[in-house]
Image (tube, rainbow, N blue to C red):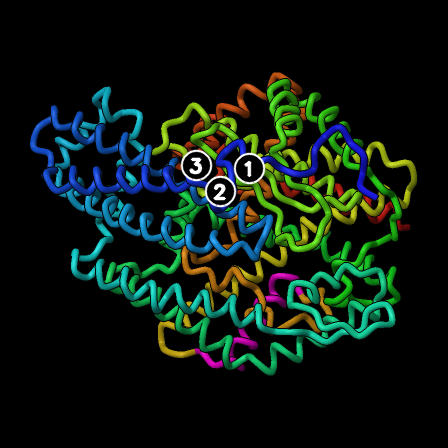
Amino acid sequence: MKDETKYSQVWNLDKLYPDGSASTQFLDHISHIESKVFSLEEGLNFFNTPKEINHSSKVADLIDNIGCIRINLSQANSYITCLLAQNPQDQNAPTLKGKTSSISARFDAGLKKLQKILVKTDHHLWEDMLDTADLNPYKFILNEWRKKADMHLTDDEESLVSDLMVDGYHAWGQFYHSLIGSIKVNIQVDGERNELSVPQAINLRSHPNEEVRKESYYALEEIWEEKKEQFAKILNHIAGFRLQVYKKRKLENILEEPLMENRINEETLSAMWKVVSKNKQPFIKYLNRKANMYGHTKMKSYNFWAPIKNTNQKIKYEEAVNFILEHFSQFGTELENFSRQVFNNEWIEAEDRPNKSMAAFCASFPISGESRIFMTYGNRITNVLTLAHELGHAFHNHAMKSINGINRQYPMCIAETASTFSEMIILDASMEKAESGEEKLFLLDEKLKRSVMNFMNIHSRFLFEERFYEERKAGIVSSSRLNEIMHEAINEGYVGSFDNPSIHSWAWTPHYYITKSPFYNFPYTFGYIFSLCIYAKAKEKGKEFEKDYLALLRDSGSMSTEDLVMKHLGEDITSEAFWEKGIELCVRDVEEFITLTS
C-alpha cells in the first residue's frame, strides 16, 4: 500500500519538456544548442589575439555566448540523466546523450581554441583588459583559462588526443563499467540462494545478519581475485594515457591537474591531510569499541557498515518532509521557503518502485531555474538524511540562479558543502529528538561512519592513487603489486585498525576508473570538514548566518577556494588550525559514542 501523503513522491519532468525522450521540444532545445555552438565556431574563425584594450568587448561577447551554451548543455544533460534514472531501459535517451556528447566535444574544442588565442595576448594589455567593466566580473575565470591554455598542445596534437580519448582513454573507463555490470555474485540471503549484481552484493554490507555480510564480502573477494588481471589492465591503461598527456603538457606533479580543478594549492591539501593524520586515534577507539560489540577485538571489514542497533522506526514521507522543513527553518528563511517550493512543485522522484536507477542525485536545470532530486524513499531515517543531502545540492543550484553561466561552475571540493550542511542539520535534529538510547546510538553511528570514511577510507584511496601513479611512470604495475600498494595504503589510512581489509579495493572502487577527473577522493574529505566548519558557524549565529552562507555559495564558482573561505569566513585554509576546528566536532561524537556504549 502506497504512503498517503499530500506531497507527491513522483517528479514532474513534463513541466520541463513534455513527452519524455520523445519530446519534440527537447529536440528543439538540442538544435538550439547546436546553432549556438556553430555561432561560437564562426565567431572564433574571425577572432584574433587582442591588440588593444577596446577588444575587451569582443571577448565579453564570446564569454556571454560560452556561458549561454554551458547552461543550455547543463539543462540538456540533466534532463537525459533524469530520463535514464527513472527508466534505465529508455531506448531513446542514449541516442539523445550521443547527440549532446557530440555537441559538447565541439564546444570544448571551441573553448580551447579561444583560450589558446587569449594566452598570446600581451601580459600588460591582458591586465588592463581584465580591469575593464566588460571583463572584470570574469577576471578569475579568464586567468584560469590563460593558465590552462599554457598547458595545451598544438592544434594537431590536441585533435589527436581528443580522438584517442574517445576510442582509447574513455573507452577503457566504459569497459570497466561494462565488466562490473556483467558480474553476477551468488549469495545466500535469508535462506535463499540469489544471483546478485555487484551493487546489490555490496549493499549487503549493511545487512543485519553478520553471516550474510561475511558471505557477501568473501564472495566478492573471490571474484576480484579471479578477475584482477582484467582490472589491472584497465587501470594501467587509464593511468598510462593520463601520464602520457601530462608528459606532453610538461606536468611533472601528478597532483597539479586535480589541484587546479579543485582551485586549491598544495599547501592547503597538505595542511588538511596532516591534521587528519594527527587525529585518527579517537576513530580507532570508535572502531575497536564497535568491533567489541560484535564480539571481535578488531573491526572486521564486513562489519563496518553493519547497523549498530536494529532500528525498526518507520518514518512516512510526509513526516520526513515536515521534519526537514521544521528544522531547516531554524537556520534560514530562504532555505525553508526554497525546500517547501521543491516539495510542492513535484521536483522529487522518491517513489519506492522497481526498475529505477539505484544512486541518489540532484540535477540542475539552470534555464528553468529548477532542480530535480532522484532517490528511493524507504521510510528509514537514512532515507530522510539522503533527502536532506540532495535538497542541499538543490539549494546550491538555487543560490547560483543569478550568476552568469561562466561563473557557475564550482569545484568538486565545494560541491558537497551545501549538501553536507543540510544533512548535518537533520542528523543532529534527529539525534536530539531520539526517543531512546538505541535510536540515538544508531544515528551517532551513522554520523561516525561518515567521519571514518572521510578521514580514513578516503585517505587510503588518496595514498593508493598517489603511489600507484608514481610507480606507473616506470611502466605497467602488476596486479600483485597493486594489491600490495592497496594493502599498505589501507593500513596507513586506517592505522592498522581493520582486520583483513580488502586488498582488492583498487579493483571495485569506481573512482579510480573515472577518466574525467583524477584523484576523485580528497575533495570528499575537504568538503566534509569544510561543511562542518560552516555548520558550526551557522549554529553559533543562527538565522543571521544565512546571508553570509548564500554569498559564499554564489561566489563558489568565481574564486580560488582559499580566497573564497578567507572572504566569507575569515579563515586561512592553508593553516592546520582551520582543519582542527572541523575534526574537533567529530572527535566529540566519538566521546559520546564511547559514553553511550559503556
Q: Amino acid at mark 2?
A: Tyr
* Secondary structure type for disc 3: helix
Q: CA distance from mark 2 to mark 1?
A: 8 Å
Residue position for label 3: 562
Is residue 68 among what the camera can see? yes
**Residue 564 shown left or right of residue 198 in the figure:** left
Residue 491 inside the magenta-drawn segment: yes
Residue 532 visible within the image = no
Identify residue for label 1.
13
Magenta stretch, main secondary structure, is: helix
The residue under label 2 is: 79
User: Which is nearer the eye, 183 or 265?
Assistant: 183
Direction from residue 438 to residue 538 in the image, left or right: left
Q: Quadrant of residue 136?
A: top left
Q: Which residues are magenta?
A: 477-495
N-terminal label among 1 and 3: 1
- The percent coordinates of residue 22 (x first, y second) are 47, 45
Report the quarter where the N terminus lies: top right
Residue type indicated by callout 3: Glu
Q: Which label sits in the foreground, 3 or 2? A: 2
**Cβ atoms under marks 2 and 1 closer than 8 Å:** yes
Could you say where residue 360 lies in the image, as x and y percent from the top left? 62, 47
Residue for point 66% across, 68% down: 197
- Crowding around mark 3 (Cα neighbors within 10 Å: few <14, some 14 to 19, many 20+) is some
Residue sitting at 33 percent across and 63 percent down?
165
Q: Name which residue type carries label 1.
A: Leu
For the point 75% across and 41% down, the residue is 588
- Residue 41 in the magenta stretch? The answer is no
